[in-house]
Image (cartoon, coloured by chain):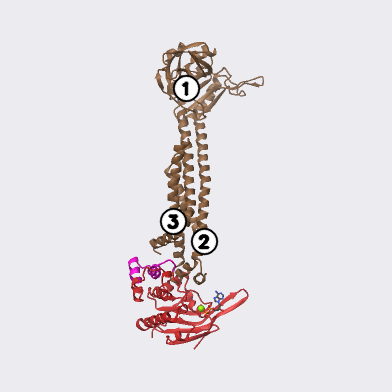
Chain colours: A brown, B red
Amino acid sequence: MIWDIAFRLALRALWRNKGRAMLTALGVIIGVGAVIAMLAVGAGAQQRIASQLENMGSNSLVVRAGSVTRGGVRTGAGTTSTLVTADAEAIAQLPGVVATAASVRTSAQARYRGTNWGTAVEGVSEDFPTVKNWPLEAGEFFTDRQVVSAEHVCVLGRTVARELFGLVNPVGETIVLKGLACRVIGVLSEKGASAWGQDQDDTIVAPLTTVQRKLLGINYIHRIEVQTTGKEAASRVYREIKRLLRERHRLQPDEDDDFRMYNRAELAKTAEESASVFTWLLGSIASVSLLVGGIGIMNIMLVSVTERTREIGIRMALGARRRDILWQFLLEALVLSGVGGVFGVLFGVGVAVALARFSQFQVDITPWSIMLAFSFAAIVGVFFGLHPARKASSLQPIEALRYE
Amino acid sequence: MSTPVIRMAGVHKTYAMGSVQVHALHGIDLLVEPGEFVAIMGSSGSGKSTLMNILGCLDVPDDGDYTLNGEDITRLDADALAGIRNRAVGFVFQNFNLLARTSALDNVEMPLVYAGVSKEERYERAEAMLQRLGLGDRLHHLPSQLSGGQQQRVAVARALVTRPSLLLADEPTGNLDSATSGEILALLDELNRDEGLTIVLITHEPEVAAHARRQLTMRDGRLEG
Ligand SMILES: Nc1ncnc2c1ncn2[C@@H]1O[C@H](COP(=O)(O)OP(=O)(O)OP(=O)(O)O)[C@@H](O)[C@H]1O
Ligand SMILES: [Mg+2]
C-alpha cells in the first residue's frame, strides 16, 4: 500500500476516537516524560559530583599519619608521630609528583574582641593556594620565610571571616587562637560544601611551623597532600610513596604501615560510578511507566481491531492484502506512540526545568536521553502494536465480513 | 472462441460444525462466458452464498477446479487472491457493506488504493463512476445520509470502479423495496447490455431472476437447470 494512504488512514481512525487516542497517548507521554526527567536528575547528580571532585583535585593523593599497634593496642588514625616534613620533601622528588604539601590540623576557639568561633586550624606551607587550587579573596598568603620563622599570622576561611568580623574587613586585624595572637593577613575565597557535605570555608590556615610549635607543641605532621601529573600517574605514585615511606620509617616486612593513603582519583571513580548506577536506576524505574503506556496502546489497538473487524473484511474483499491491513494498524500504533513520544519529550523537559527551578535538584537534560526515550517509545509502539496488527491481518476475509 | 470467465468443475465445500459435516457445495460444474447474465436461485441454505464466496475468491474450494479468466485460482496464495478480488471481481452484497462514517466518494475510491492508482486518478475515476450512477450530487454524503437504493448504487459504483470483468451480486435487492429494486436491476441490465459486463446474481425472487438471460437453481449444494 502507498505509505501516505496508510498514514492518512491511521490518522483518520485516531481522529475518530480523539478522546480514546489522547488517553492512550497520555500513557506514553507520562512514560517518556518520566524517563527524560529522571535521566536529567541522574545526569545532574553525576555532573555535581564530578565538579565537586574536580574541585577537590582528582590528581591528588593524601598520606595521613596512621595507627600504630603497640602491645596489641591499636591507636586511631593520625596518632603516630613518624610522619615528618622530610617525608613530604622526599615524596616531592618522586617522578610523577608535581608538588607536596605537609599539614597539621587541630581545632581551636578563635576570638576577636567580643566574639568567638570554634573552628579548625590547619598548619600548611606557603604553596597551599596553588596546591589546593584555592585563590584568595582579599589580602595575601604567607611566604616561605614566614613559614620558616613560624610567624604569628593566619588566613581565614570565608565562614570564619563572616562569623568573627561580619562585614568588617579582617585583613590587618588580630585574632586570638588558644592564647596566641595572630595577625590576619588574608581571606580565602568561598569554596562551599565538600562532596561529603562539610563546610570547607569553616577553617583557619596558618604557617605549618606556627601550628606545630605554638599551638600543638609537636614536630611531626598529620598529612601530606601529593599533587601528581595526572590521574594515570596517581596509582603508580601511590605504590611508590608506600614503598618510600616504609623504607624511610624502617618498617619490617611483618609490620603494618604507620600511615594511610587515599587515592582521590579512585574515590572520584567510585563516586562517578555510583552516580551513573543511580542514573540508570532512575531511568529504568521510569521506563517501567513507558512499558505500561505500551500495554495501553496494545489494549486500545486490540479493541480497535475487534470493533473494525467488518471494515477489515470489506477492505480484504475489495483487494487489501494482509500486509496492507498490517501496516494500517501498525502505523496507527506507531502514530500513537510517536505523538506520545513528542509530547512526552516536551513534558519531560518541562518537568526537568521545573525541578531545576523549584527544588534543589541539579538537572542536566542530555540530547542522548531525549533520543533514548523517544526511540524507546517508538520501539514500544512497534512491539505492542505488532500483535494487534497481526491479529487484524490474519483474519479470514469471509469471517471478517460476516462478523456482527 | 474466447476464454470463459468462470470455469468450475466438481467443486466441493464442506463445513465442519463439531461432529456434523455440512456439505454446502456438492460437486458444482459451472461455465460462464463473457457477457453472460446468470441468475442463481434456490432455497435458503442451499449453498448459494458459499458458491458466491468461492466465485469471488473470498474462499477456496475443498476440492475441484476453478479457473477465473483462465487463471487457476486453486493454486494462488492469499495475496494473489486479494489481487484477483481487486482487479477481476466486483462485489455487491445484500447489506451493502459500505464503510461507515466514510463518504460515498471515499468508499468508491477505496479499492483503487489497493490497485496502486495515484490519488488524482482515484478521485477522478470514483467521481466519474458515481456520476454515471446518478449520485453526482451525493459525493460527500455518508452512508447513513443515503437511502437504501442510493447506498446500493454506491456499492455498485465501488464494485465497478476497478473495471472488473465479473460482477457478483448476492441478493443485491434483498434489502430494497420493489421500486428501488427495479432501479438497481435496470442498472445491472444496462451494464450487461452496453458494457458487456459479465454478471452472476443470486436472488430468491423469480421476477429478479427474470432479468438474467440464464437461470440456474441450487438445491442441496448442487446446481440444476
Ligand atoms: N461458516 C460456516 N460454518 C458452518 N456452516 C456454514 C458456514 N457457512 C455456511 N454454512 C452452511 O452451509 C450451508 C449453505 O449456506 P449458504 O450461506 O451458502 O446458504 P444460502 O443458499 O446462501 O442461504 P440464504 O439464501 O439463506 O442466504 C448452510 O447449511 C449453512 O448452515
Ligand atoms: Mg446467502
Against A43, is A106 above or below? above
Q: Secondary structure at mark 2?
A: helix
Q: Which mark is residue B113?
A: none
Is the CB–ligand 1 distance for label 1 below 8 Å? no
Q: Is there any visible trace of residue A218 in the rendered image?
A: no
Q: Which mark is residue A159?
A: 1
Residue range corresponding to the magenta coloring: B99-126
The disc labelled 3 sits on which kind of residue?
Answer: Val
Of the numbered discs 3 and 1, the one sitting upstream in the chain is 1
Q: Quadrant of residue B116?
A: bottom left
Q: Secondary structure at mark 3?
A: helix
The disc labelled 2 sits on which kind of residue?
Answer: Val
Callouts 1 and 2 close, C-beta under 8 Å:
no
Give x and y (percent) for residue A232.
47, 32
Against A230, is B171 above or below? below
Chain identity of mark 2? A
Q: CA distance from mark 2 to mark 3?
A: 17 Å
Chain identity of mark 3? A
Q: CA distance from mark 3 to mark 1?
A: 57 Å
Q: Which mark is residue A335?
A: 3
Q: Which mark is residue A303?
A: 2
Q: Is there any visible trace of residue A281 in the rendered image?
A: yes
Quadrant of the snapshot with the N terminus of chain A: bottom left
